[in-house]
Amino acid sequence: MSNTLLERIQAPGDVKLLAENDLPALCEEIRSFLIQSVSATGGHLSSNLGVVELTVALHRAMDLPQDKILFDVGHQCYTHKLLTGRRAGFAALRQKEGLSGFPNPKESDCDTFIAGHGSAALSTAIGIARAKKIKNEPGKVVVIVGDGAFTGGMVYEGMNNVSKLNNLVLILNDNKMSISKNVGQMANYLTKLRTDPKYFHAKAQMETVLERIPLMGDAMIRLLQGGKQLVRRGIYHSTMFEEMGFQYIGPVDGHDVTMLAQLLTNLREQYAPIFLHVVTQKGKGLKQAEENPGEFHAVSSIDLNHLTDPELSPKDSFSATFGSTLAELGNDEPRLCAITAAMKYGTGLNFFKHAHEDRFFDVGMAEEHAVSFAGGLASQGLLPVVAIYSTFFQRAYDQIIHDVNLMKLDVLFAVDRAGLVPGDGETHQGIYDTAVFSHLGIPVYAPANYAELQHWLTRLVREMRGPRAIRYARGGETAALAALGCSGALYDRVESRPGARVALVSYGAETEEIIAASDLMHIQGVAADSYKLTRLYPLPEDLCETLQGYDTILFAEDAILTGGIGQQLGYALRQTGWNGRYLLHAVDNTHLLHASVPELRRDQQLDAQSLANHLLRL
């Protein structure tokens, strides 16, 4: 017999076989497992520690996969994966050919939908719930949405479209607000009363009887509902949710697993879409994560016995270099403003906030608003910088076009986590920004090291106007790239060998691979020069002229193949009459993995050995 409760859970539904009084102990085992496992592999920690009891209760009350559970954002799904028989996979969490850090229907039929970006899962859940209605399929659709996602507009667009979906449960995972004692006790009492199936039957029967009363029935229903809403406005502040068609329940304690399981079981019978307000503590069970949940939101492998002080400045990284440089520029430029979308620490803008708090804006998980807001600032003569991860800039495509680029406003887009990104897989790769910005005619710069980032960020702020973008990789500079220094030129020949008829060209972090590829070719007796672009778009004016003398040119980029910089350079060379051999290595987005960056490069044929081999075969 298994030694622990968690070991008894080998398949979906096994949690139902446990005794009710075993559930709190199971939650503690899960929390301990997650802390130990994620500290070894890295992953999202704080958010998962906060939803252990809620997820256990859902699996206790729901029947998967007939019932559907969606997570917003999907990185809080670790307990769900444990309860659906994937415990052994956590040893390779977010590693190549290992367990994904997000829901993935390819892994399990209990994973309903891929969910890597926030605020979108409710709209998806509404679609699934509506499909169940159209197909006359049984089962509930439950979507867990964090309070952070409620800063994004899509949640409200979805809430406006729930109309009478009595198979939909929206759970607000509120890990910021607390409940004062008196309100909490009253709320708990009323919640128990209002989630009893007898309440639903009585309510439905009363409304049916009143509707049959000629003339006065509808008016009486509205009067009773109005009085009820006045009471709830004082107790729950929930009028908005009920006016949008939800049956509001809560707030309830998100760490009382027994109560949650009973409540969710009662909600199997519902007459309207449910809005369940659950209060949790992010990072629960790990003291440092409880005190600073943002610092432990996503972690690399960590030593639990020697945790760093979360108040310390971030380690050296492109993000920290960007943030500290921007803060210094703000000293001399009073018009400079900094905007981010719920990523103050991740983008390094905590430095700017400390130095210029009145000009720092964290707009929440609302990238669309961030860009349009920046457009408004710029239209009034200010100089906004919008710092967002590359993968999340995708969400603001229309706003970049319509609210900034159309009027050529002075907005600087700082594209963090550009290029290949480890761990999070296909939902978080920063591979589309070069194509997007260049297609819109927006200049794009790609510094390869800290010195270049500082130089070009300063010039982009002080000298250049209109829409413009600067992109840089996740993490820190390597020794090889740091050694290149900064020439201040739009492109550099970073390696030159006598008699070279082959040129390798790249930019950003991928520059390291073409240098190494050139070295590998040299060992095999083939001379090759290497070029690093800093301005990607428009292509430097004399670049094609410089490259004319080579018979073979290989361009490598850790961004999308179709419409990327490599294709643009190839076309430009042909337009000048160059008839040499052009080889292009870029990202094929049809099979994006969750793996380390070196593994991703090998998989995409962007590593030095693959580049050298391609040339040597010719």
Image (tube, rainbow, N blue to C red):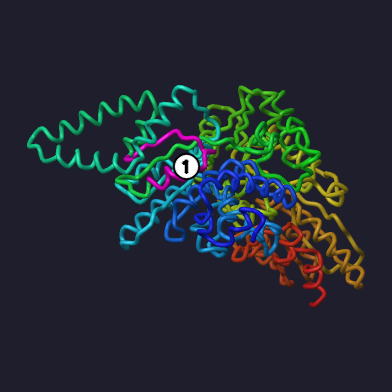
Q: Residue at x 40, y 40 (%)?
A: 275
> Compared with residue 90, is residue 257 higher up or lower down, i.e. above or below?
above
Residue 347 in sight here: no
* Image location (x, y in percent) of residue 180: 49, 23
Q: In front: 509, or 108?
A: 108
Residue closer to the observer: 526 or 472: 472
Residue 213 in the figure: left or right of residue 463: left
Residue 522 colored magenta?
no
Instruction: Specify the segment rendered in magenta.
Output: 245-266
* Residue 463, percent from left and from top: 69, 34
On screen, residue 165 above or below 221: below
As shown in the figure, which amino acid type bears the numbered disc 1? Leu
Q: Quadrant of the N terminus?
A: bottom right
Q: Which residue is mark 1?
A: 260
Query: Residue at image x 87%, y 49%?
Result: 479
Question: Which residue shows up at 46% across the image and 48% down it?
Answer: 143
Position of residue 618 relative to residue 39, above or below, is below
Task: Determine whether, in the image, residue 403 is placed left or right of residue 443.
Answer: left
Taking depth in this image into account, of 57 and 16 the one nearest to the observer is 16
* Label 1 CA crowd tier, 10 Å (few <14, some 14–19, many 20+): many
Could you say where residue 102 lies in the image, as x and y percent from the top left? 59, 54
